[in-house]
Image (cartoon, grey):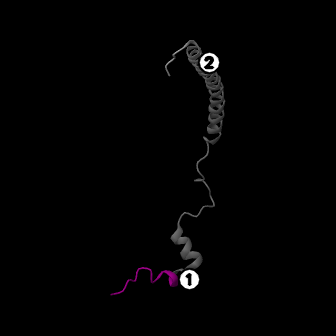
Amino acid sequence: MIAKNLDDRLAIIKAIAEKQKNEKARKERLATIRKNTAKVRIVARKKRTAEDKKLSGFTGGQDNVNHYTDASKYAKTYYGETLHETTRHDTDWGDY
């Protein structure tokens, strides 16, 4: 926009001043948000590390004495003939 008279120039100056004022206000809002976010992150990090310390002794359930580790032996012991009858044809592909 090119100003041709005094009123146009004043309107341009006013528009630029308003734009700069809005930019400054936005920067101030963002600075406040950044500051508050940093505080929240610090608290969250402390909370997360505290939870990690609680889980440091967790082994993933690997020391469960009731866990049956030999699946094939378990199946033979408890399902015997039923297991044999249902799996005997699993590897029989035949001559097709």
What's the distance in space between the residues labelled 2 and 1, CA to CA? 82 Å
Above or below, 16 relative to 66: above
Does residue 33 appear left or right of residue 80 in this picture? right
Q: Residue at x 64, y 26 (%)?
A: 33
Residue type indicated by callout 2 = Lys
Does residue 40 appear left or right of residue 16 in this picture? right
Dot 2: element: helix
Q: Residue furthest top?
A: 6
Q: Which residue is mark 2?
A: 21
Residue type indicated by callout 1 = Thr
Q: Residue 18, position in %: x, y? A: 61, 19
Q: Which residues are magenta?
A: 84-96
Q: Which residue is mark 1?
A: 82
Above or below, 62 relative to 70: above
Q: Residue at x 54, y 14 (%)?
A: 5
Magenta span: chief secondary structure:
loop
